[in-house]
């Protein structure tokens, strides 16, 4: 059947676009500025050039309305803090002296001043800088960036729509500033914040904005009646401001639920909703509230978070239903395209058949424009695109790459007993203490050591054929010996080999597992200038041969101290990949767990006594709605235990998590049944130690005493103070001393100094404990 065209031409739009550029030009310019090799003017020109390029790419693809204000040197939530004037007192001097340097000081800290806390943006791997607020916070409007980018786009002939983090989401993501009572609720500041948003809207209106998008993803989470009332009040007030553009309130990542009725009844002119599988309930909910008569609906039918091609027929069916539920319907991705790589056509190393299944940001803009054309002009106008889409979907569904009978048979044979370790933790703990002979407050690191320029050059030379495998391996051996020697001299108790052979904690394993596809240019921003290349989990997973045993055993041969085997856990292997969407996540996790279980068992057989299986994504992947938590945590914790439950009692299993709200998953952390967990704690001032204590966590834990995402070197006194704070919550016999996270992003000078201070702090506090006990 031929679909009839919409009564009004549907517009194509996006909420945001990848910032980095095709060759990560932004990363190079910002890091060059930090090192003094790039001037501030040159950095600004690079940024302006990238914005021009992005808008041109969008317009050329058929996007009718381009976003502005989504570009950032570091983080869009930090940009919002600048916009509303919430610069922490400790950073005001730096900001007043130089706005750009002060901005980066808030993001990264300095040797003398700590940065803002950093945590995950909802259930993504993007990290934002947490606003610090208190009862004395004074807001003030600074729309300089937002107006400047709007005017840039207008001057180039585009139809721009500024995008701003909404006031509810901004306050709900904020935390009490240092020194403010922990029970302070930033949402109580809403009435002070709304006039500032009104001022910003007025500035944008005066500069020529027809529409402004206010992002409110926090409203897709479970919200109390008081929070929903606050949302109603906020958009009633902003909606009745006379001197403003039209308002488009955007939500994404999940269904709006009760907040949909609130926003639909508000005087804003439009809503943007997610209609992908994770938020499919929005369709029925929208019909239940009577739709949006007379208002604009931006329908997110193209998945903005994953890289699989869109199902055109399915999306057109959804769009056709929505035509009767709003005054006009426009087409978009489900969220900002910040979360996907830039261009799939650059991936020349991927099998062409598999590349047909992939849609990165540029391909998604084409999909959006195609759907908008089909909705506006009828499906006859996109007949060729529909036929090609059907063929590509069928190619994926029928490919032997996606279905391995042996893997499926092994997964189906898993029993409950396979995911339970025996004996109980107290028995294992006694065996491990006897076997390892570690001191009280044992010191360790999380795994990686600095990835030096020499290592990167050697890796690139191997890929280019300038050195052979033997020469490369000698370079890796040299690095491992140096890392082991340094740790021994410093006095670290449980060592790591430093992971010099690894390009990324997920990609390294993905390249050695069947069913994964690695990209060469698929960079995605994780935080600031840190970009990752998530591999594509496209088929059934198995492990053809050992992945880490050789280098771990080589490192162990260099020392009599225990060296940890280092693996990335199954949940993180899924979360930090673009995971297949054609089977339940729990099934995929079980496949990965079985492959990793083989590696754990081989490490133990090779003499490794301590094995760390990192799961930093456990909290990140937690569904945004509480009703969905139990099902997720069941398969997530089971897959970890399936990975680790095949070892002897005296083999110590560690795990690691970082930069998340751990209190939300503390029961699940317990259910992992790891012997030791290390967690980020320095930026959050040991909050996680209190959360573990409140839960009654019975195992060993290492809340971090060194914030490795800041270039500053913590003194031994600072590390000791954090350690003493940790001892207030966790008994000495169960407390470890470690950094927050791996050291890959740090340089050797700061790594040496910081680890030496960490060991000095541990020794100092050990001595205090001995004196107290004496």
Image (cartoon, rainbow, N blue to C red):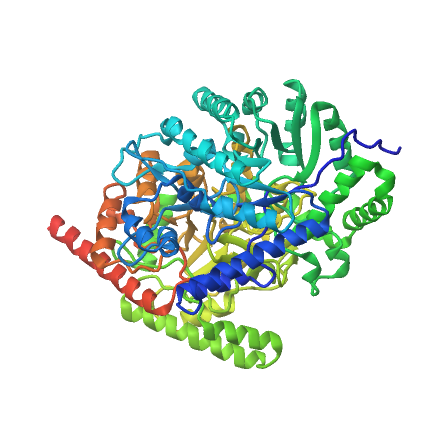
181 sits to left or right of 144: left
The residue that appears at 58% across and 63% down in the rendered structure is 23
Residue 590 seen? no
The residue that appears at 89% across and 33% down in the rendered structure is 1
Q: Position of residue 394 (x, y in %)?
A: 81, 47
Q: Position of residue 362 (x, y in %)?
A: 68, 52
Question: Vertical placement of 421 versus 495: above or below?
Answer: above
The residue that appears at 55% across and 81% down in the rendered structure is 470
Residue 530 seen? yes
Marks counted in the figure total 0
Q: Position of residue 63 (x, y in %)?
A: 69, 45
Residue 547 in which image quadrant = bottom right
Q: Nearer the viewer, residue 575 or 93?
A: 93
Q: Nearer the viewer, residue 231 or 729?
A: 231
328 sits to left or right of 143: right
Residue 442 in which image quadrant = bottom left
Question: Vertical placement of 443 versus 586: above or below?
Answer: below
733 sits to left or right of 329: left
């Amino acid at each position: 059947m031929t679909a009839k065209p919409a009564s009004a031409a549907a517009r194509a739009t996006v909420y945001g676009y990848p910032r980095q550029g095709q060759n990560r030009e932004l990363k190079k310019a910002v890091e060059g500025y930090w090192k003094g090799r790039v001037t501030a003017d040159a950095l600004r020109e690079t940024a302006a050039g990238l914005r021009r390029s992005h808008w041109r790419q969008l317009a050329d693809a058929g996007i009718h309305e381009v976003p502005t204000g989504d570009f950032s040197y570091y983080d869009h939530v930090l940009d919002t803090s600048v916009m509303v004037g919430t610069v922490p007192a400790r950073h005001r001097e730096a900001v007043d002296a130089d706005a750009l340097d002060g901005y980066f000081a808030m993001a990264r800290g300095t040797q003398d001043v700590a940065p803002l806390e950093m945590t995950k943006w909802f259930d993504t791997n993007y990290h934002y800088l947490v606003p610090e607020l208190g009862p004395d916070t004074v807001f003030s409007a600074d729309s300089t960036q937002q107006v400047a980018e709007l005017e840039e786009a207008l001057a180039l002939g585009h139809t721009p729509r500024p995008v701003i983090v909404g006031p509810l989401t901004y306050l709900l993501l904020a935390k009490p500033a240092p020194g403010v009572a922990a029970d302070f609720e930033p949402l109580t500041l809403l009435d002070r914040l709304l006039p500032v948003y009104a001022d910003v809207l007025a500035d944008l209106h005066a500069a020529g904005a027809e529409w402004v998008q206010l992002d409110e993803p926090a409203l897709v989470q479970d919200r109390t009646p008081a929070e929903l009332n606050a949302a109603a009040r906020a958009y009633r007030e902003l909606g009745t401001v006379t001197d403003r553009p039209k308002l488009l309130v955007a939500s994404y990542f999940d269904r709006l639920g009760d907040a949909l009725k609130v926003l639909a009844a508000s005087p804003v002119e439009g809503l943007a909703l997610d209609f992908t599988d994770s938020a499919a309930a929005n369709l029925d909910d929208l019909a239940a509230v009577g739709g949006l008569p007379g208002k604009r609906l931006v329908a997110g039918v193209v998945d903005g978070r994953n890289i699989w091609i869109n199902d055109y027929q399915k999306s057109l069916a959804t769009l056709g239903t929505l035509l009767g539920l709003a005054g006009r319907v426009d087409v978009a991705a489900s969220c900002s395209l910040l979360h996907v790589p830039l261009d799939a056509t650059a991936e020349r190393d991927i099998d062409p058949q598999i590349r047909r299944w992939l849609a990165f940001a540029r391909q998604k803009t084409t999909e959006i424009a195609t759907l908008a054309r089909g909705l506006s002009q009828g499906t006859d106008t996109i007949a060729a695109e529909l036929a090609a889409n059907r063929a590509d979907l069928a190619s994926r569904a029928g490919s032997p790459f996606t279905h391995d009978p042996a893997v499926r048979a092994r997964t189906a044979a898993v029993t409950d007993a396979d995911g339970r370790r025996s004996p109980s933790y107290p028995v294992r703990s006694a065996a491990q203490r006897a076997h390892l002979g570690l001191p009280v407050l044992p010191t360790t690191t999380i795994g990686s050591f600095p990835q030096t320029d020499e290592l990167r050059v050697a890796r690139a030379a191997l890929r280019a054929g300038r050195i052979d495998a033997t020469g490369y391996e000698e370079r890796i051996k040299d690095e491992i010996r140096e890392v082991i020697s340094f740790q021994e001299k410093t006095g670290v108790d449980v060592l790591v080999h430093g992971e010099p052979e690894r390009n990324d904690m997920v990609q390294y394993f993905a390249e050695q597992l069947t069913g994964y596809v690695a990209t060469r240019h698929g960079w995605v921003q994780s935080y600031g200038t840190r970009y990752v290349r998530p591999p594509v989990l496209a088929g059934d997973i198995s492990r053809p041969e050992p992945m880490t045993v050789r280098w771990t055993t080589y490192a162990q041969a260099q020392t009599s101290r225990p060296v940890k085997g280092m693996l990335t856990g199954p949940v993180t292997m899924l979360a930090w990949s673009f995971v297949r969407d054609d089977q339940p996540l729990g099934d995929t996790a079980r496949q990965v767990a079985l492959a990793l279980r083989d590696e754990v068992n081989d490490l133990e057989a090779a003499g490794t006594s301590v094995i760390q299986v990192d799961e930093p994504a456990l909290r990140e992947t937690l569904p945004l709605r509480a009703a969905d938590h139990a099902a997720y945590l069941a398969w997530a914790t089971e897959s970890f235990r399936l990975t680790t439950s095949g070892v002897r009692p005296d083999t110590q299993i560690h795990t690691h998590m970082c930069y998340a709200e751990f209190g939300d998953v503390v029961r699940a952390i317990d259910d992992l049944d790891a012997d030791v967990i290390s967690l980020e704690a320095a930026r959050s001032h040991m909050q996680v130690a209190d959360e573990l204590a409140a839960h009654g966590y019975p195992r060993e834990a290492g809340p971090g005493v060194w914030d490795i995402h800041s270039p500053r070197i913590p003194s031994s006194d600072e590390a000791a103070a954090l350690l003493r704070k940790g001892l207030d919550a966790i008994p000495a016999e169960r407390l470890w001393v470690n950094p927050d996270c791996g050291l890959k992003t740090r340089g050797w000078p700061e790594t040496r100094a910081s680890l030496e201070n960490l060991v000095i702090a541990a020794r100092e506090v050990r001595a205090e404990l001995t004196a107290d006990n004496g």
